[in-house]
Amino acid sequence: MTRQAIVVGGGIGGLAAAAALRRIGWQAIVLERAAELREIGAGMSQAPNALRALEALGVGEQARAAGVPTHASGNLRLSDGRYLQRARPGDASALLAFHRADLQRVLLEVVPDGWVRTGAEVTAVRQDDDGVTVACDGVEASGELVVAADGIRSTVRRLLWPDAPPPRFLGRTAWLGIAEVAGVPGSITLGRGGYFLIHPVGRGRAYWAYVITADQPDVRYEDEKAEVARRVATWHEPIPELIEATPAEAVIHIDICDLDPLPTYVRGRVALLGDAAHAMSPDRGQGAGQSLEDAVVLAAAVAAEPSIEAALRRYDAERRPRTQATARGARADGHRTTSTAAHRALTSMIRMMPASLWRRGIAADGNPTWRWRPPHLPSPTPRH
């Protein structure tokens, strides 16, 4: 008899979990709260560890076709345009940049038709020795396992981890957008109190993010595009051009938060995955990548262990130390790159670092986080 899991959340982590479970012969019901399965109009980069996870899920080739090499970590600039470090023509890039919707689409294509149910808001989770049941808008779904991939404000975490603190504001806010501008190389511009990130994301588009310090969350402006344009009006091109080329309604303003470390990612037959378990700041570009790793490790544990309980103990033991260390590192990186007091020291250090040493540090095997290797997953079963 085919074994069944319930995945809560239809984002990148949830779809990756469904794809991974399919590879080990399980079925899954993916419950997505939104009425339509879509990602916000923003971008991201994926490092070698995430790309290996995508290979393990059987979508490595498709992901590489959807992504664009980005030299953002090799092109470091000041707001007046001067380079602190500069990628050379022909340099290999360890990073691929994606529009979030493009990577989501790659994963959705390997999830069988009928597995995803939209407009499904979870209201309760019940479990016993035989299985687990999720209540959703008056309808119930049951299985042997629940994977909660429902984001930083996870309903499942709130229900089953009632003592866990809410997301923590990190003292930073960000504007994000996708501009219809072609030929823009990836870069990071370091200013006082903030930085501006650019990634090319294919089809004549560029993703941008402006991250700054903020005294409090939830401060919003009547015209977000005008506000971010005002703040970087004197910065080097193509920064003002990218903002100008972004439709006003497509400029996203978010506050940056993470989660305090949880003592466990599992409760009985329920496992937290991705941001629901370990939401982190974007400063190491590892949020989605760690979700992809989670999905592969969880499926490998389920396939290898004799019981769900043993599999989830293994998943927790393997994933919690790595993801929480990555979150701590991202938080520290974010403080360094946006601290006004540390700006002069940071830029001086980068400027004085030999270019050869900098390139080794951003090579595919130069970053310890990027060296992760996935466990083996079986070959996929036929789609139905």
Image: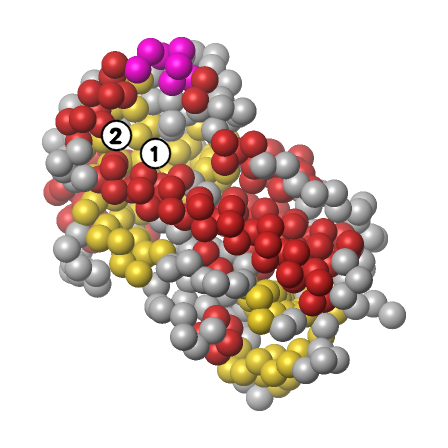
Q: Is residue 21 above or below residue 97?
A: below
Front in this rendered view, residue 178 or 12: 12
| Proximity of marks 1 and 2: CB atoms separated by less than 8 Å | yes
Whether residue 209 is visible to the viewer of this picture, yes or no, is: no
Whether residue 56 is visible to the viewer of this picture, yes or no, is: yes
Badge nearest the viewer, 1 or 2? 2
Asked if residue 329 lies in the magenta stretch, the reply is: no
Kindly report the distance in space between the C-alpha atoms of the residues bearing marks 1 and 2. Answer: 9 Å
What residue is shown at x 63% (from left), y 56% (from top)? 315
Left or right? Give the position of 301 relative to 341.
right
Which stretch appears magenta?
353-359
What residue is shown at x 12% (from left), y 42% (from top)? 230
The residue carrying pointer 1 sits among few (fewer than 14), some (14 to 19) or many (20 or more) residues within 10 Å by Cα, namely many
Q: Quadrant of residue 260?
A: bottom left
* Callout 2: SS: strand
Q: Is residue 42 above or below residue 208?
A: below
Residue 151: assigned label: none
Q: Name the N-terminal-most of marks 1 and 2.
A: 2
Name the outermost residue toward the right. Answer: 1
Left or right? Give the position of 43 relative to 145.
left
Asked if residue 358 lies in the magenta stretch, the reply is: yes
According to the picture, the residue beneath numbered tag 2 turns out to be 189
Q: Amino acid at mark 2?
A: Thr
What residue is shown at x 23% (from left), y 50% (from top)? 172
What residue is shown at x 19% (from left), y 47% (from top)? 213
According to the picture, the residue beneath numbered tag 1 turns out to be 198
Give the color scheme: rainbow, by chain, secondary structure or one colour.
secondary structure
Q: Amino acid at mark 1?
A: Ile
User: Could you tell me residue 12's position as x and y percent?
Assistant: 54, 53
Q: Quadrant of residue 207?
A: top left
* Callout 1: SS: strand
